[in-house]
């Protein structure tokens, strides 16, 4: 499944194949009896998404948010101001106790990361 805003990246790596389906902000998926809500969190890539499982108190952020700050934005199609906006508007608005399952490294919580937003902006990375 792929958010349509990442289609250009998909075509670079899978030119002969289309995604099995599209992801949309607010869409709900059920995996192993757990409902996941798709949150469009662009910045690392235009179509980056996080998957929020409120009944588990967990959000899977992939490369959007790590323990200690935003994911990488020094690549083509990534953008630091956009990832910070995604984190501020889509992730830091979740309950503070929400566990953040990252794409790399240790897990964290929304409450542990929220106080550092101003530092990330000041660092610009």
Image: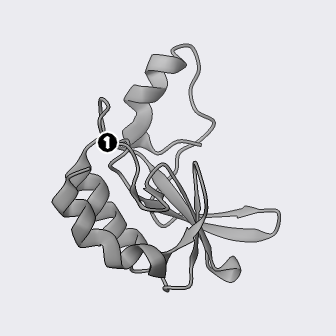
Q: Residue 22, image x and y in percent?
A: 53, 45
Q: Quadrant of the N terminus?
A: top right
Residue pointed to by mark 1: 73
Residue at 48%, 67% (x, y): give it.
Answer: 26
> In this rendering, is residue 15 above or below 103?
above
Residue at 69%, 71% (x, y): give it.
Answer: 35
Residue at 43%, 48% (x, y): give it.
Answer: 48
Q: Residue 105, image x and y in percent?
A: 59, 52
Left or right placement of residue 77 versus residue 123 in this view: right
The local secondary structure at tag 1 comes to loop
Q: How is the image coloured?
A: one colour
Q: Residue furthest left?
A: 122
> In this rendering, is residue 90 above or below 4?
below
> In this rendering, is residue 77 above or below 108?
above
Is the residue marked by circle 1 packed among few (<14), some (14-19), or many (20+) residues within 10 Å?
A: some
Relative to the observer, which residue lies in front, 81 or 122? Answer: 122
Give the mark count. 1
> In this rendering, is residue 52 above or below 79?
below
Q: Residue 6, image x and y in percent?
A: 41, 37
Q: Residue 27, image x and y in percent?
A: 53, 63
Residue at 46%, 77% (x, y): give it.
Answer: 112
Q: Residue furthest top?
A: 16
Relative to the observer, which residue lies in front, 62 or 20? Answer: 62
């Amino acid at each position: 499944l792929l958010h349509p805003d990442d289609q250009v990246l998909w075509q670079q790596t899978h030119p002969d194949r289309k995604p099995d389906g599209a992801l949309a902000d607010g869409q709900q998926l059920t995996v192993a009896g757990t409902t996941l809500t798709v949150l469009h969190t662009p910045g690392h890539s235009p179509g980056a998404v996080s998957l929020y499982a409120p009944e588990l108190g967990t959000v899977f952020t992939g490369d959007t948010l790590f323990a200690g700050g935003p994911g990488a934005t020094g690549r083509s199609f990534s953008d630091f101001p956009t990832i910070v906006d995604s984190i501020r508007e889509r992730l830091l608005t979740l309950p503070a106790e929400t566990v953040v399952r990252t794409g790399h490294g240790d897990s964290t919580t929304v409450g542990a990361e929220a106080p550092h937003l101003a530092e990330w902006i000041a660092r610009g990375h």
